[in-house]
Image: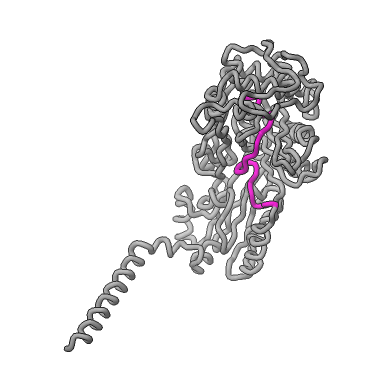
Amino acid sequence: MNAPLRRVGVVVMVLFGLLFANLNWIQFQKADEYRTSDYNGRVQVADYKRKRGNIEAGGTAVATSKETTGKLKFQRTYPGGPKYAHVLGYKPVNLADQGIEEVENDFLAGTSDQLIGDRLKDMFTGDDTGGGNVLLTLSKRAQDVAYDQLRNNQVGAKKGAAIAIDPRTGAVQALVSMPSFDPNPLASHNGTEEAAAYNKLEQDPDGPLKNRALSETLPPGSTFKVVVAAAALENGITKSTAIPAGPSYTPPTSGSPIRNASPSICPNDQVTLLDAVTYSCNTGFAKLGVRLGADTIKEKARQFGFEQDDLTVGQLGEDGLRTAASRTGDMQNPDGSTDPAALAQSSIGQNNVRMTPLEGAMIAGAVANGGSQMRPYLVRQLLAPDRTTSYYTAKPRELRQPVNGQVAGDLREMMVSVVKKGTGENAAISGYTVGGKTGTAQSAPDRPDHGWFIGFALDKNGTPVSAVCVVLEEAGSRGSAEAARIGGQIMRAAIADPGGR
């Protein structure tokens, strides 16, 4: 054999060796991945052979399955359309699962290890027992009100979010993101229709697929003053202590003065901490933040939940809907020293401070609950396909305690004052003690301000029954008042129809 033929033979043998190695790698290393891939048609048929379990809120099925005549036996449907979309997500044929449909997929599909008894029974009976049922904490009435009030807000805001929780347990009572979307077309068995629906939503500049309640962060404006007030109360200042204020304050190193929303707000040189919160005194809190120092402000914010990167909302202690971390941002000069101007702006919820609506509700909930911040959750119970067995029931647990009972009591009094005679009057609920804090946050020089409200409601016994956060993006000067009104409406609905509380 001459040299060229030998070289060809060697190349062929090497190629056969590589092919053999690749086949073995696929067979032994990648088999499970390919077998369970969404692109495997046999997997899709098997996935839709068994009826998927319901997702329920307040005793009503908000995600269910109907039988079809096509190759895929069952199709997922969402009777509430866009009302629950950012909680439920969707179960598509050719796309990735989202929302509760994703995080509870195994139980809903009936493939969870918890449901092995049902599958073993099916081997003998030949049946295809449906998947398990997921019961959510949502109050149907509170969810309805949150969705309708956001969509029909009185300031014309097109984007925003609202979330309400039970301060005693962390159970989510309502969760809405605006704009929303109808998940039904995304569950279509027609691949062309499904892809077209998704592409339209994905390309929408308003971002309807974004879960703004959990995963979007914005400057919180004056709602952040609750955190600064907590730091002040822990550092020798009482609610009746007079703090420096005045109509204008120019921090050291900055030529840009900080002013109050109107000349009538704390025009005097001093104001009590109680009045500074009640009337949202920017100059008072800017000076207070500089006095307390960046480390103190950042640490108190961290104790309330800022900077937490791993919080999810689903089952307690299990994977759930992912959340974004709220941040206090930089308050430093390039050399690492504190920048008083940045610190002053941060102390009124501007500069680089960013917060999720979830974090806002958790702050209000901790204040209402005596300083105990409960871990938020959405899944109340997992029921067997025949609903006779419960495989999981949520047992609320404390996440952290950012303030002690005394400080929480003082903060409650100040936030109640905001609703009684300050900027949060629109949130009042007859027969209940309501506390809150509004916030107006600059978005961009050429855009209207964001409007915020965080708040809580206590019953006649002083027991916290709901805590809420509402944000209306680029809502303008009336945004925070409208956010307070919507927050009050949501809490009123949660009280009337507590759902999973």
Q: Is residue 436 left or right of residue 291?
A: right
Residue 70 in the image: state x and y as whole percent: 61, 70
* Number of numbered tags placed on the structure image: 0
- Reply yes or no: does residue 386 show up in magenta: no
Image: 296 above or below 38? above
The residue shown at (36%, 66%) is 26
Q: Which residue is nearer to you in this view: 474 or 247? A: 247
- Reply yes or no: does residue 222 show up in magenta: yes
Image: 469 above or below 97? above
Quarter of the view holding residue 497:
top right
Q: Which residue is nearer to you in this view: 457 or 381? A: 457
Residue 396 in the image: state x and y as whole percent: 55, 31
Q: Is residue 336 left or right of residue 438?
A: left
Q: Is residue 215 left or right of residue 260?
A: left
Image: 61 above or below 164? below
Residue 437 in the image: state x and y as whole percent: 71, 27
Pick the quarter of the image with the N terminus. bottom left
Magenta range is 206-227
